[in-house]
Image (cartoon, rainbow, N blue to C red):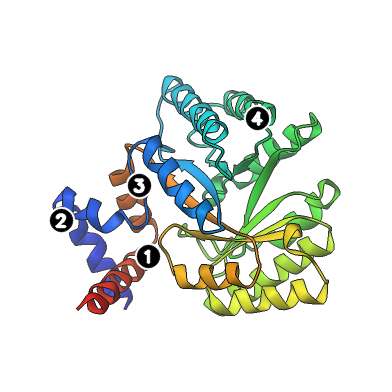
Amino acid sequence: MALLDRAIVRVLPAVPKPVVKRLSSRYIAGDQLSNACRIVKALNDKGKLATVDVLGEEITTEEEAIALVAEYEHVLEAIQREGLDSNVSVKLTGFGLKLGRDFCRGNLARLVRAAATRGNFVRIDMEDSSTTSDTLAIYRELRAEGLDNVGIVLQSYMKRTLTDIVELADLKPNVRVCKGIYVEPPEVAYQDFETVRINFAEAVAALLDNGSYVGIATHDEWVIAESLTLLEERELHPHQYEFQMLLGVRSHLGDELVREGHRLRIYVPYGRQWYEYCLRRLQENPKIAGYVAADTFRRLARRR
């Protein structure tokens, strides 16, 4: 299967761009903010929340980073104007982390304050391991300034995650827990599938015990079942946690969670860099290519 996944990644650049766009349309809202707003409204109508992500983390100049911050401000304005139930999710490399830590921090603080004036929330995505320490440090600095409408992401395949949870406990952070998609060396990340799963459940348990609000971001039925058990054991109500999933991925699982009364937030990416985003994500983790291909074939088979 790994060989097939890598083969799909190798041939994808040769596939005509319109074909890639059609295949990816299930997972990416489009290239314009209006596309994302339309998708978010449809999700809200089905009882689901959303988080909007503007594609564009691969920036090389300060001007590009500032432009991305401005685009996010437009997103916040649109969410308020259209009465959507959505927050936003950002990647610090898009805000200039590689160009300068203070520059990035200033950009993030600007957006978090803009969100606060609108009663909204900003989630800081976690990227590869080279950014983890800076990301957590910037998060802590913003919280020290009294900015509470900001959250973080922790990845269960990272060996440092349970330690990070202990070190963040005093903040009672709002945390999205996910498995992690970046290819990392065994020195810093667990490579075994079952170990990553178990670490995910342990991370959720530790965060709940610390009094954190947890976004359980997974499409793994075992992880969902384990998380539901942890929530039931602690007698938590739906407003004290949420599940999170990617747009277009295993929607039936999300629908079931909503029917059972759980909060579900869908990750809605959009932007002009959709094609580069697709290629980069697949190259970073070829397993995703196999999953998307299998999902596409299943949908085509059902239509026939």
User: What residue is pinned by disc 4?
Assistant: 118
User: What residue is pinned by disc 2?
Assistant: 15
User: What residue is pinned by disc 3?
Assistant: 277
Q: Residue 157's spot in the image, x, y percent?
A: 58, 65
Identify the mark at residue 114; answer none if there is no mark.
none
Amino acid bearing label 2: Val
Report helix, strand or loop for mark 2: loop
Residue 291 drawn above or below residue 113: below
User: What residue is pinned by disc 1?
Assistant: 288
Name the image quarter holding the N terminus. Answer: bottom left
The disc, 2 or 3, on the residue closer to the chain's N-terminal end is 2
Report helix, strand or loop for mark 4: loop
Amino acid bearing label 4: Arg
Report helix, strand or loop for mark 1: helix
Answer with left or right where residue 242 lies relative to residue 218: right
Amino acid bearing label 1: Ile
- Asked if the residues shown at circle 3 and circle 1 are in contact, with their CB atoms under 8 angstroms apart, the answer is no
Residue at horizontal 14%, vertical 54%?
14
